[in-house]
Image (cartoon, rainbow, N blue to C red):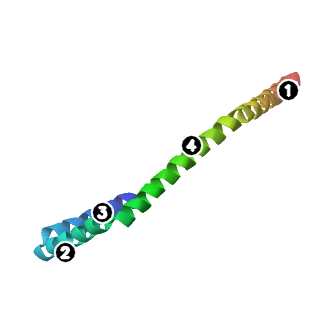
Amino acid sequence: MFGKIVVFAAGLGVGYILGTRAGRAKYNQIKRRVDEVWNDPRVQKAADDAQEFVREAARDAGEFLREKAPVVQEKVGEVAAATKDAVSNAAKRATKD
């Protein structure tokens, strides 16, 4: 619900800015400035560096998960077997009386 309110309020704000002459001029000014900043080589280098960092982190995370998956699978199997035994024993005790 809160998210819908935020989106609605943002839509109202954007509509107001785009709907007024002064707002449109201000919007164009802000847009030009954002474009200048975004196209700055230093910003592009930082964005590229961040993208490469994320790629490496994702690769490392994938390797970690591949290494740990068998261990997790084994533990889940052990817990499942123990749970099955516990439930079976409880059912036997419950029906024994």
Q: Mark 2–mark 4 contact, CB under 8 Å? A: no
- For disc 1, the marked residue is 89
Q: Earlier in the sequence, mark 3 or mark 2?
A: 2
Q: Is residue 28 above or below residue 61?
A: below
Asked if residue 24 lies left or right of residue 90, the reply is left
What is the x, y in percent for residue 11? 26, 62
- For disc 4, the marked residue is 59
Q: Mark 3–mark 2 contact, CB under 8 Å? A: no
- For disc 2, the marked residue is 26
Mark 4 surroundings: few (<14), some (14-19) or many (≥20) residues within 10 A: few
Q: Report the residue at 56% width, 43% height from top.
A: 59
Which numbered disc, 2 or 4, marks the residue closer to the eye? 4
Q: Mark 4–mark 1 contact, CB under 8 Å? A: no
**Three-letter code, disc 3:** Asn
In front: 83, or 55?
55
Asked if residue 65 lies left or right of residue 19, the reply is right
Which numbered disc, 3 or 2, marks the residue closer to the eye? 3
Q: Earlier in the sequence, mark 4 or mark 1?
A: 4
In front: 39, or 18?
39
- For disc 3, the marked residue is 39
Q: Earlier in the sequence, mark 1 or mark 3?
A: 3
The quadrant holding residue 32 is: bottom left
In front: 63, or 27?
63
Q: Report the residue at 63% width, 39% height from top.
A: 63
